[in-house]
Image (spheres, grey):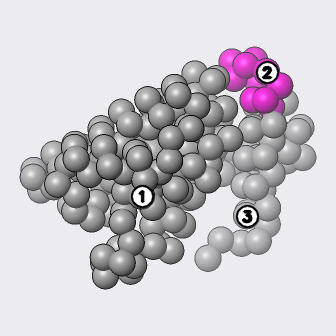
Amino acid sequence: MPRRKDIVVVDQLETAIFNLLKEKEYKDISISELCDKAWVSRCTFYRNYNDMDDIIYQFFMRKSKKWWDENYNTFLKEEKNVSVSLFQYLLSLKDVILLIYQKGLSHIFEKHIFDSAINGRNVFDKEQSYSSARVSGSIVGLTNEWVRRGMQDSPEYLAKFLNKEIEYKTI
């Protein structure tokens, strides 16, 4: 279990990066400025992250893991549609997702989608690997179009397209 102090540092850095992105372009933000805004040292920053991309990437990975862990058993019982739940989860992050797309950082979000799909899976299994890539590509493509349209369509609407695109099995 992470130490409380580490959790606070992570929260401070995430808040700082997203607040700075609202004010300026990503390329204009320095690690020093980020650390000053978050009230942490550069040493603390580098103990937790490799670079600023890593803050955003880890934010999405942590949020996705939490969403998955909270819903996994329900998905197994088929009481909840995975696709609808996924887009509801993404909609809950609308402000952050729109911000990173606006700042040209969609590649970080997309990497998180692909990495989440294979997280903990046997990537040596060729069929599973291709299946995960197909699902991930569909999610990224639909999300890109959804963002382009301002994320106005409902999660249920997007889920219909994802479910048509793939024979949906638990990812």
Type of secondary structure dominating the magenta stretch: helix
**In which quadrant will I find the C terminus?**
bottom left
Residue 128 placement (x, y as % from top left): 15, 55
Tell me: 112 left or right of 21: left
Between the residue at mark 2 and the residue at mark 1, the CA separation in whole angstroms equals 34 Å
Nearer-the-camera pick, 99 or 45: 99
The residue positioned 68% from the left and 41% from the top of the image is: 95
Q: Which mark is residue 2?
A: none
Spot occupied by residue 62 in the image (x, y as percentages of width and height): 56, 58
Q: Which residue is mark 2?
A: 24
Name the secondary structure under disc 3.
helix
Report the magenta residues as a range. Answer: 20-29
Q: Identify residue for label 1.
A: 84
Q: Amino acid at mark 3?
A: Ile
Question: Quadrant location of residue 38?
Answer: top right
Question: Callout 2: few (<14), some (14-19), or many (20+) C-alpha neighbours within 10 Å?
Answer: few
Q: Could you tell which of marks 2 and 3 lies nearer the N-terminus? A: 3
Residue 44 lies in the magenta-colored region: no
Q: Position of residue 73 (x, y in %)?
A: 38, 80
Q: Amino acid at mark 2?
A: Lys
* Mark carried by residue 7: 3
Question: Mark 2 against mark 1, which lies toward the viewer?
Answer: 1
Sooner in the amino-acid sequence: mark 2 or mark 1: 2
Residue type at tag 1: Val
Camera-nearest residue between 63 and 120: 63
Secondary structure found at label 2: loop
Cα separation between marks 1 and 3: 30 Å
Residue 7 or 160: which is nearer the viewer? 160
